[in-house]
Image (cartoon, rainbow, N blue to C red):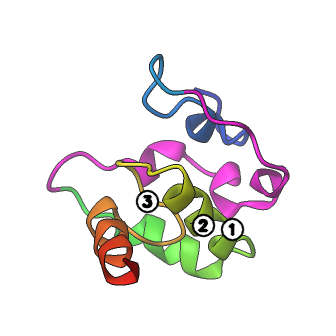
């Protein structure tokens, strides 16, 4: 995994799932940091990732991407998988 290239987004759930790289990904603040922070171990804090997301210029696009692709892991758009699932249920 290469830090700074947003590789983790293009390999989610590999090899069974392939997702397209989006132009906005180059502007994401997480592309400039350790991608592992956005996939914390069970029970570990995701606070640092969410704080970075809060400042990110493409936060909304990232969240929309995660929702549209039904991503089940990782922090996207500042939301955890549980928070995204809750958002999906409330929108239904």
Residue extending farthest to the top is 15
Q: Are marks 1 and 2 in contact (CB under 8 Å)?
A: yes
| Residue carrying label 1 | 61
Q: Which residues are magenta?
A: 18-43
Q: Residue at x 72, y 60 (%)?
A: 28
Q: Which mark is residue 75?
A: 3
Q: Which residue is mark 2?
A: 64
Q: CA distance from mark 1 to mark 3?
A: 13 Å
Q: Position of residue 32 (x, y in %)?
A: 70, 52
**Tag 3 or tag 1, which sits nearer the N-term?**
1
Image location (x, y in percent) of residue 10: 63, 34
Q: Give the Cα distance between marks 1 and 2.
A: 5 Å
Q: Secondary structure at mark 2?
A: helix
Give the residue furthest to the front. Answer: 92
Q: Is residue 71 above or below residue 57?
A: above
Question: In front: 91, or 51?
Answer: 91
Q: Earlier in the sequence, mark 3 or mark 2?
A: 2
Q: Residue at x 31, y 50 (%)?
A: 40
Q: Residue furthest left?
A: 43
């Amino acid at each position: 995994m290469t830090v700074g290239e947003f590789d983790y987004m293009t390999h989610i759930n590999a090899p069974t799932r392939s997702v397209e790289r989006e132009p906005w990904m180059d502007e994401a603040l997480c592309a400039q940091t350790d991608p592992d922070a956005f996939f914390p171990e069970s029970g570990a804090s995701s606070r640092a990732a969410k704080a970075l997301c809060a400042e990110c210029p493409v936060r909304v696009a990232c969240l929309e991407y995660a929702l549209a692709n039904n991503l089940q892991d990782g922090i996207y758009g500042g939301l955890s998988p549980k928070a995204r699932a809750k958002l999906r249920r409330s929108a239904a």
